[in-house]
Amino acid sequence: MGLAGPLDALDFSALGSLLRLNLSYNQLGGAIPPTISALSRLVSLDLTSNQFTSKIPVGMGSMKELRFLSLSQNQMVGAIPPSLSNLTGLVSLHLEDNKLVGVIPKGLGRLHELMYLNIGVNNLSGSIRLKNLTKLRFLALYQNQLSGPIPFEIGNLIEVTNLYFSENLLTSSIPSSIVNMTKLESLYLWGNQLSGFIPLKIGNLIKVTDLLLSKNLLIGPIPSSIGNMTKLNILYLQDNQLSGFIPLEIWNLIEVTDLALLKNQLSGPIPSLIGNMTKLKKLGVLDNQLSGPLPVEINNITGLTYLVLSNNNFVGYLPSDICKGGALQYFILSMNNFQGPIPTTLKNCTTLERVRLEHNQLTGDVSQCLGMYPHLYYMDLSFNLLSGTLPPDWARWHNLTLFRISNNNITGVIPTEFGQLTKLRELDLSSNYLQGEIPKSFGSLTLLYNLSLGNNQLVGQVPSEFGMLTNLELLDLSSNNLAGRIPDQLGNCMKLRSLKLNNNNFSGTIPLAIGNLVDLQDTFDVSHNSLTGEIPSQLSKLVMLQSLNLSH
């Protein structure tokens, strides 16, 4: 609905027979009138998703017949009134997504009939004091500033199916009593400061489908009992300090779709058992100490969309049929010790969006293993041993914003067609064996902020069209065989912070227009050229410049 304005127009005292009032999902605003407490027979009050900005009226605590109360998704301020503790028949209380402050009233623990409590997304502080609500089924305190330990008595809430304590400031260890909450289906404790070990018997929670313990300070091994949680769909343990091998039992959790173990200190191999996880869609283990080859059984996971294994110690060849199901979007295997060619089957993986294979020992002709990727926006193949030429067809990666293939053995010329990659923001072809001229078509790449072509065998002049690259911040053309004059048009690249033209065959004078580049702060290097004439006084305008090299 589109109802707006305040509630003052209603004479609540005249509506004494009202049992249910639902004004949710409107645009009502202002204060909730204190006179609303005149609705003494009201059983259900729903003001969800409006624009109320007042405190919660203290008088609401006198509405003793209330069973359902929702003030969620407003802009309510102030503290939760202790008077709400008088609503002893309340079954559902929803105050989430407001601007409430202060502590959770201790008296809420007297609401023994309460089954649903959601006070997430506020600014509440202090400790959790709800241990006596033994009929609770749904408890959400997420996105607040609650602190202190999770009370041991939480284990008494054995009817709870959904527990959301994420994004608070909770400390100490996860209480072992939590394993008594055997009806739990969702357990969200991520984004706190919880420390210590994951409870050894957490596998008692066999009904849990979502287990999120990430972004804490947890240490020690992953308990093998997690293997008993056979209904798990989502397992997030990333951003902790977990160590040891990944338990073999985890790889038998055949219902898991999302497995995130990244940013820990885990070691050992990924076993062939991973082939059992045929429903897996996302696997993230980057920033660990995992080793060994990737088992070929990973090819069985045909629905895999995210494979993120960066910054480990993996070795061997890349799996030949990694995109067998045609679903892979993120293929992130950088900073390992993989060798051999990029699988040719990747050529038909048209779903790819982000590919990072940099800092490995990959070999082979790169022009033969990559295909047409209409959704690709990020490709990094740098720091490998790849060879071959840059195919003009790659210009059909129209959504590409970053392309790096530096520090390889790429030969041939830079295709003129690359000027069609108009969404590019970073292009790094440096440290290869590229020949020929820099295409004038690069003048169309007006979103570029980093263009690195250094350490190749490029010849000819710098295209004057570079003057149209007004977003350029980093330009490196060093260590080539470029000649002619440095174009005045570079003075139009007003955002340049680093300009490297050293170790070429440039002649003539330093353009006066370089003095326009007042944002130059890192480097201006034209050393080892054949420049003549005087040093332009305009260079004195480069007041932020830290490194100036005009030698040789």
Image (spheres, rainbow, N blue to C red):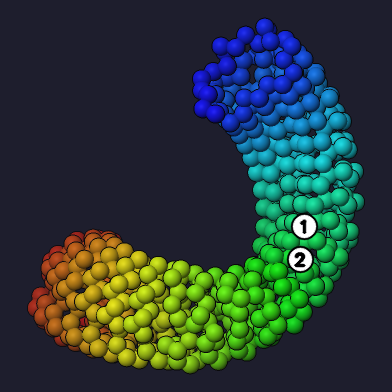
Image quadrant in which you'd find residue 216:
bottom right
Q: Is residue 135 left or right of residue 212?
A: right
Disc 2 from disc 1: Cα separation: 9 Å
Name the residue: 43% across, 77% down: 372
Residue 121 lies, in percent from the top left, at 64, 40
Amino acid at circle 2: Glu
Name the residue: 70% across, 36% down: 119
| Mark 2 Cα shell of 10 Å, populated few (<14), some (14-19), many (≥20) | some
Look at mark 1 in the image and give the residue it sits on.
209
Answer yes or no: is residue 323 visible.
yes
Which of 45 and 285 lies nearest the eye of the viewer?
Answer: 45
Name the residue: 74% across, 73% down: 277
Look at mark 2 in the image and give the residue it sits on.
255
Q: Is residue 117 above or below residue 190?
A: above
Q: Give the SS element for disc 1.
A: loop
Name the residue: 82% across, 36% down: 115
Which of 335 and 340 lies nearest the eye of the viewer?
Answer: 340
Label tally: 2
Contact? badges 2 and 1 (CB < 8 Å): yes
Q: Earlier in the sequence, mark 2 or mark 1?
A: 1
Amino acid at circle 1: Thr
Q: Is residue 291 above or below residue 160?
A: below
Q: Give the SS element for disc 2.
A: loop
